[in-house]
Structures are given as C-alpha cells and as structure tokens.
Image (cartoon, rainbow, N blue to C red):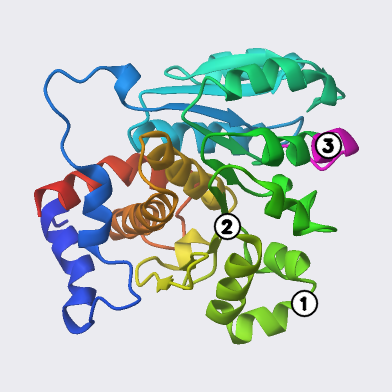
Amino acid sequence: MKDIKSIHSAIVSVFDSCGDDGIITPSVAADAVAKRPSDVHKGNCGRLLVCAGSRGLTGAAVLSTQAALRCGSGLVTLACAHELNDIFEIKLTEAMTLPVPSQNGSVSYSAKDKLFAKMHQSSAFLIGPGLSQTADIARLVGDAIQECSCPLVMDADALGVISPDPSVLKRAKCPVIITPHIGEFARLCKKETSQIINDPSAYAKEFAGQYGCIVVLKSHRTVVASPDGKVYSNLLGNSGMASGGTGDVLAGAIASFASQGRDALLSALAGVYFHSLAADIAAAYLGEYSLIASDIINCLPYAIKETQEN
C-alpha cells in the first residue's frame, strides 16, 4: 500500500491538465487551512453551533459534528432534543451538547430562546442534518434565517422545510450557505430533477443570484455557486461517496471553516475540496465499494495535512 503522500500526489495530479478557471483547486483549499500560530487557543479557532438529529436520525448529528471537529473548529456544541442527549453525550467525546426542549424526539419551537441564545454566542451555525421536518422545525428554521448574525449553513431538513417558499432566504441578515443534493434542489427550484441534472451549474448560479446565498449543489460533480455569478466545479470524489451520511460530513466541514472566520464562499469551496479529497484517500485504502461516511471523517486530517504541506 502506498503512503499518504504518494496517494495525495496521485489524486491531485488530476489538476495538472486543468486551468484554475472555475475549478476548486488545491491552492484555493489551502487558503482555508493556513498554519496557526503557536500561541493559539481553542476560543480563537471557531465556536460552532450545530442543531441536528432526531429520533431515528441521530447519526446525521454525530457525523456533522465530528466532521466539524476534524476540520478545525475549536469549540463545537450540538443542540439536540433533550431526550436524545444521553446518546450524544456517549457518542461525542470532544463536542459539547446543549439539550433543548423537544417533543417526540424532535426539537420543538419552545427551544427557540435557549437555542438562539447559544446561536448569538457562536461564530457559525449549522442547522438541518437529521433534524426532521415538523411544523416546529419549519418555524425555527424560518426564524433562524431572519435572526442569525453569524454565517448560517443549511442542510437536509432545514432545506426541506423551506422548499415550499424559499423566498425566506431573501430576509437573511447573515451569509447563508445551502447544501442540497439534486432532489432537494429540484424541490427548492420547483423543477424536475432531470432539468437540474442537465445543467446543474446554470440552475445553481441562478438560485444563488436570486436568493443571495452560496449554493453547494451536491452530485458526482458538485458545483458551488455564489451570488456574484461565480461558479466552481469539483474534480475530486468517487462512487463510494454514494452512501448515507456523506452529506452530513460535508455540511459539518463547511460549517467548521465558516466558524473559523473564513468567508462563506471559501468555506464552501474548502469544505467540498477536503471532503472529496478525504474520500479519495479513504478509497485508496479501502476501495470505493465499502466506503462509509465515517471513513471520510477519519481521512480528513490526512487531506488537510497534505494540503498544508504542498
């Protein structure tokens, strides 16, 4: 088996024949992981709040939180349904938990005061993975969009509950990054999935411009679009990423960089790059067929380290 350095070199050689225009390159990702000064402390490395998970979907919360830690956030807090807190206390060693009011294993709207107090103390907020799509979640997500002052990353169920009326995104006062897969994006756009698949860059660009957010449109060739009309394509990744939980890992990675003070576009680009590079490193060892989301998390440190050193 080759060592990590040779695997990394082989993977990123794909960029040798490509220009930088419209491509998420190693140099772009490297801008997000500049080496830290020796006297840095955890309070300087980002305070990320994650609101995720519900009964039957606790894994999504765990994966996004662990990915955020691996991508460098100094302090990560998972806000969760209070009756699920013991699960997360056991599963998440390095993260803190914030049990909030809930009903039937899902965060309730009565959690707003406690949740938003923590949101206002955080440097980024990730909401949605495995959260469920109840009426209470819809109200919480709508209020978060309008009241959040730090970068807001919206994934999975947070996108599902606004899909009937995505215009709420226009009322955001903070940078917003959305991370839909093709199906979720089709529902947001009120289009057929086949239309999105035929021209994902164009639809992502249009949506980003219309609603003033960063769009990370996940597929086998993920694209990132910004409100100013810029669109970037990802060249890395493999079929092993077609496995439950990999999107949660990506959301955690993007939110992690946002919590560390990177701007919304760079956070999205770096998250996509390191997520795919880690998946390719994992596939080099394990193969694509048996790859799972936690394998990607385990390889994030190698992806970041090699990018810093090259």
Quick one: 243 or 158, which is closer to the camera?
158
Q: CA distance from mark 3 to mark 1?
A: 24 Å
Q: Amino acid at mark 3?
A: Arg
Q: CA distance from mark 3 to mark 2?
A: 20 Å
**Is residue 44 left or right of 240 when viewed as pictured?**
left
Q: Amino acid at mark 1?
A: Lys
**Is residue 199 left or right of 259 when viewed as pictured?**
right
Question: Residue at horizontal 70%, vertical 15%?
Answer: 114
Q: Quadrant of residue 138?
A: top right
Per the rendered image, the range of residues in magenta is 130-139
Q: Identify the element where label 3 is drawn.
A: helix
What label sits on residue 213 in the rendered view? Answer: 2
**Is residue 277 left or right of 81 when viewed as pictured?**
left
Q: Identify the element where label 2 is drawn.
A: loop
Question: Residue at horizontal 10%, vertical 55%?
Answer: 310
Residue 110 in the image: x percent, y percent? 83, 19
Q: Give whichever of discs 3 and 2 has the lower sequence position.
A: 3
Quarter placement of the N terminus: bottom left
Q: Residues within 10 Å of mark 3 (few under 14, many from 20)?
A: some
Mark in front: 2 vs 1: 2
Query: What residue does disc 3 label?
Result: 139
Q: Is residue 106 above or below residue 244?
A: above
Q: Quadrant of residue 283?
A: bottom left
Q: Give whichever of discs 2 and 1 has the lower sequence position.
A: 1
Q: Identify the element where label 1 is drawn.
A: loop
Q: Residues within 10 Å of mark 2 (few under 14, many from 20)?
A: many
Q: Give whichever of discs 3 and 1 has the lower sequence position.
A: 3
What label sits on residue 191 in the rendered view? Answer: 1
Mark in front: 3 vs 2: 2
